[in-house]
Image (cartoon, rainbow, N blue to C red):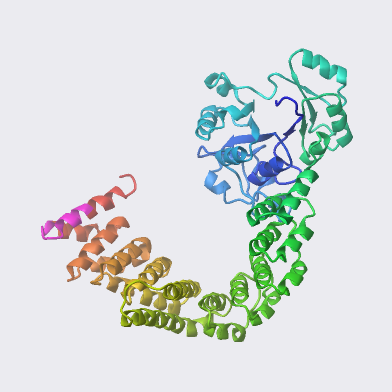
Amino acid sequence: MQAQRVELLCHRTANKDVPENTLESLEQAALLGCDVVEIDLRRTLDGKIILNHDGFLERLTDGSGEVETTFYDDLRMRDAGSWMGERFAGIHVVLFEEALRLARERDTRLILDIKTKGIGTDVLRILEREGMLHRVQFNGEWDDVKKLYPAGTDAGDGRAWVQPGVTAAQVKAYHEQGKAVIANFSANEHEMDLFGMKAAVAAGVDGLNVDYPRLGADAVGRPVEEKLRTLEHSAEVGDTDVRVRAILELSRYRGFSLEPQFLRWLTDENTQVSRAAALALVEARPQTMTTAFRGALQSTHADVRANAAWALGAMQEPSSLLLPMLKDSDPAVLQESLIALSHMRGDVPEKLLEPLLGNVDPAVRGAAAVALARHQPQAAEKVLPEQLSHEITAERAIYAEHVRAGGGKFSQPEIDLIVASYRCQMEILRALNILDSAVGTHALEAQAFGPTEDYLQPNSMVAAFDLWDRVSSEPGAVMQALASKQVQQANGAEWELIHAGAGVLPQVRAGLHSEDPAVRRRAMQIVAWQGDAASLIALHVIQAERGPDAEVAAWAIAKIESLQPGS
């Protein structure tokens, strides 16, 4: 306990405000002023230590069963928030080490209530690794911890835990015994007894243990509202960095009516302040009503309109809300609106999107390509391959003009044009990858194995990666690229076939008999890394011939055999 301060202890994280034993709930307890927070620990079937109280998945997740008989990879896929309301959907089960890192960042001490027997070794190892061994106390099933770490203490060491109604005389008597006094307002029908808490503080207790940290903070004289007012003041005045930090910190608080302030800051002329407020509104729970953004969408400041559009996209609201923004005259607003629309629900007409592919601003053209692929894939198939070709031609012209003018160092205007073109092409490639069709695949193949100018290498690399999940049913173009005299293209094709899965193996096996030595060698490497047992007979034949490929064949055989079950 800290001298000269009534400390606030929180039972099972801020469990009445945010789903218990989650990072979000631990952070909320710290934000509300808790000095010490209790968390519950259990071990999963595969030995991970997680935060969980009673072990039953049905109460706290959308899964079923028990923590101790479930793999962590299964648990981390579970929604651990929706049980407390849709506003908390998407919150996940937490690893012990993640909680320790957050507690260290927020300068919070922990009481570890160990629920699974015999996990002391793992708990201590994680504590030491995270540098938190001296900032915790123990509770529950911690007998093995005592043996391994005699210096460890539990929540009762040196403390007297008393119930509401404790008198000053009783507190004094405990103090004379050298004990700190903790008044318990958890799980005893006094959880919301604010004036009982105040009375305990007046009686001289050293700490309050609570389920409702906001009430406890008020009782110990550190009301959360004062923190909020201080942060609000910082958000109003001062340097941009100070204002942004204050807004983002305010966005972490749950259950407070801060939306009016965030909406006011959204319309601030300071671009960074406006964006921070947009982030806060997206993260707000319950979710901000879409009608709240009307004023910002009509602001005279382009950055405000752009940030409001981004927020509606991040919230995945109906696309109809942003269709009017496609007539905005500012390129940044157009770009942000298009990006937002690519995440929003509902139809966006082709007649609104396709003309924007001809916009003078490359960023708008790139964003329009993605939005068109999302909402009108058939129209996108007709125009996006040609659009990408147009962008490449324009970039090629920049380089040609640079050479014609004598070459040398690129000017800043040239660099700006090249970067803008590059970013636009990356967006069009992303749009082509969205198209789940032969058109999209062929367009990506053309980039992956097409022109070889240096400035097009990023296109080739990105397109090749995009093809990983597309070529298993039709790997012909990739197989042809194995014979490319451009080493980087051939390397990309080989790696792509390794990661494309077993669907490509019939054609790769045929490559083992190719007349091209490079293709044969690469085919042997592909079947080896894929562990293709069906290739072993052909590989043994190649090895037995003792030709130039024998060494590679022997390596491939060993690799495949090492990957077989039971090897």
Residue 11 vertical position relative to residue 519 in the rendered view, above or below: above
Side of 483 where 432 appears, left or right: right
Q: Residue at x 69, y 51 (%)?
A: 246
Q: Is residue 170 left or right of residue 85?
A: right
- Residue in the foreground of this view, choosing between 253 and 403: 403
Q: In front here: 234 or 27?
A: 234
In-front residue for pair 252/485: 252
Residue 133 lies within the magenta run: no
Place residue 137 in its image quadrant.
top right
Q: Can the viewer see residue 379?
A: no
Query: Image point 73% across, 61% down: which residue?
Result: 265
Quarter of the figure that contains the C terminus: top left
Q: Residue at x 27, y 56 (%)?
A: 528
Answer whether residue 549 is magenta in the image: yes
Q: Position of residue 552 (x, y in %)?
A: 19, 56
Judge whether residue 229 can be spotted in this image. yes
Tell me where residue 237 appears, x and y as whole percent. Answer: 72, 55
Q: Using the image as rendered, state which of residue 95 and residue 426 is in the foreground.
A: 426
Residue 418: x and y, percent? Answer: 42, 74
Give the answer, above or below, for where 89 lies relative to 494. above
Is 99 positioned to the left or the right of 549 in the image?
A: right
| Placement of the N terminus among the 4 image quadrants | top right
Outermost residue on the top side: it is: 177
Position of 20 relative to 423 (above/below): above
* Residue 373 screen position, x and y as percent: 53, 77
Q: Quadrant of residue 329?
A: bottom right
145 relative position to 507: left or right: right
The stretch of residues the image draws in magenta is 544-555
